[in-house]
Amino acid sequence: MTENKAPASGSILVVGGGISGLTTALEAAEVGYEVFLVEKNPYLGGRVAQLNQYFPKLCPPTCGLEINFRRIKDNPLIKVITLAEVTKVTGAPGDYDVQIKINPRYVNENCTACGECAKVCQTEIDSAYDFGMKKTKGAFLPFEMAFPARYVIAPEIIGTDDAARCKEACAYDAVDLDMQAKTLDLKVGAVVYATGWQPYDATKIDNLGFGQVPNIITNMMMERLAAPNGPTQGKILRPADQKAPETVAFVQCAGSRDENHLPYCSYICCMASLKQALYVREQYPEATIYIFYIDIRSPGQRYEKFYQKVKDDEKIIFVKGKVAAVEAAAGGAVTLTAENAVTGEKSSQTVDLAVLATGMQPTAAEAKLPGDITYTEDGFILNDFRKGGIFAAGCANKPADVVSSNQNATGMALKAIQTLAAK
């Protein structure tokens, strides 16, 4: 079905509900502009929502997201559309026609997040939020403070007895199994793509063993393991046998700065691994950490101080050298082979758990976005400020941390407003 067009009223479309999209939407709406915030997931928050802690204060995602969700809820100028994707953008700056496909949630606004549907649901599916490290019910709340605070019925159970049980268990008539995908047409004056990033597919890096050797995880999987709402309730354990690791190795530039994978530096990986090394040390004071690196990139005084703090820990050993291979060893351990960049010698280190610092790949690298957009060879969106109208914020534009993404998003909100003001 197709809904009627919204009136042209100097509106801004923000695509992506991660930290950049939230900031862009709020900055524009709080100075009086109508904003349509479109997100493909059933919740807002993006990658930040999956973290255990983030810089610069090392606070949990709830710290930054909670206040932003409250600001969105209190602002009638922001229209949030989840489980949606933009399928068409035509027109010119100040006058765009946009088409959005909205996928069914199978749960309507009556939902009180009581959880009765999940209690009766028997089917379990892989949790994409936890990178498949745990199962979730076919009726689920994405995470505790998810916004919108509504359950989702997984498409996999539609048409099954489980779906019928979910509907019967709901006392608020919130489960709607007849929901269909629909199309929404909008008129907007400017578009900001804040489509973010995805972890580079570590299975493509054959020599590092991910997906073939047990007890090799990625840096984002480590964030979920360390998070209190993660698959192990915050306990860092080896995935294969749930044992506490006594030795952990971090492999920097796993796919980044590599002409066969991502030729650029992903900016966040060094600091993420330093932070995660402290996650391990806090939980296991006797654990020994090895960080294999090409060079450590800690931009700015605050990050440099953090690096020095980690470096001063005698249990954290830095090895300057690129890892050539990660292979299975006895007892579920893994052995890393690297060439020491200082001595030129090859060395091996066997550890209980290996963490690959996989790079940041723009979402648009594999799924091009509609509209008059120019990309880099690597899939980042280039901003053409002279042409205007369509802009990219945060990691859709370049690799960035949360602070830089927020700063950039504020600037893109202003650029979108300038497009409207010029008309």
Image: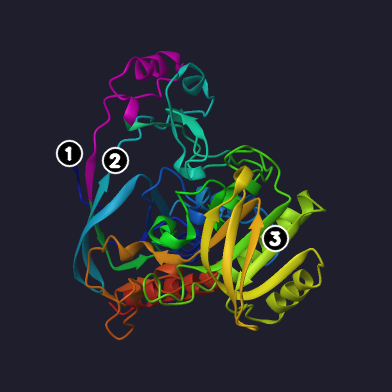
Tag in front: 3 or 1? 3
Residue 109 position by quadrant? top left
171 in magenta = yes
Q: Residues within 10 Å of mark 2 (few under 14, many from 20)?
A: some
State the SS at label 2: loop
Q: Earlier in the sequence, mark 3 or mark 1?
A: 1
Horizontal and vertical percent for residue 169?
Answer: 45, 14
Type of amino acid under label 3: Ala
Type of amino acid under label 2: Asn
Rendered residue at 73%/68% (across/down): 317
Q: Is residue 46 left or right of residue 223?
A: left
Type of amino acid under label 1: Met
Q: Badge 1 is on which residue?
A: 1
Q: Badge 2 is on which residue?
A: 103
Q: Quadrant of the C terminus?
A: bottom left
Q: CA distance from mark 2 to mark 1?
A: 12 Å
> Which numbered marker is on residue 307?
none
Colour theme: rainbow
| Residue numbers of the magenta segment | 156-184
Rendered residue at 77%/54% (across/down): 287
Tag in front: 3 or 2? 3
Q: Earlier in the sequence, mark 3 or mark 2?
A: 2
Horizontal and vertical percent for residue 292?
Answer: 62, 69
Which one is in front, 371 or 69? 371
Rendered residue at 30%/77% (across/down): 377
Q: Badge 3 is on which residue?
A: 277
Q: Is residue 166 visible?
A: yes
Q: CA distance from mark 3 to mark 2?
A: 39 Å
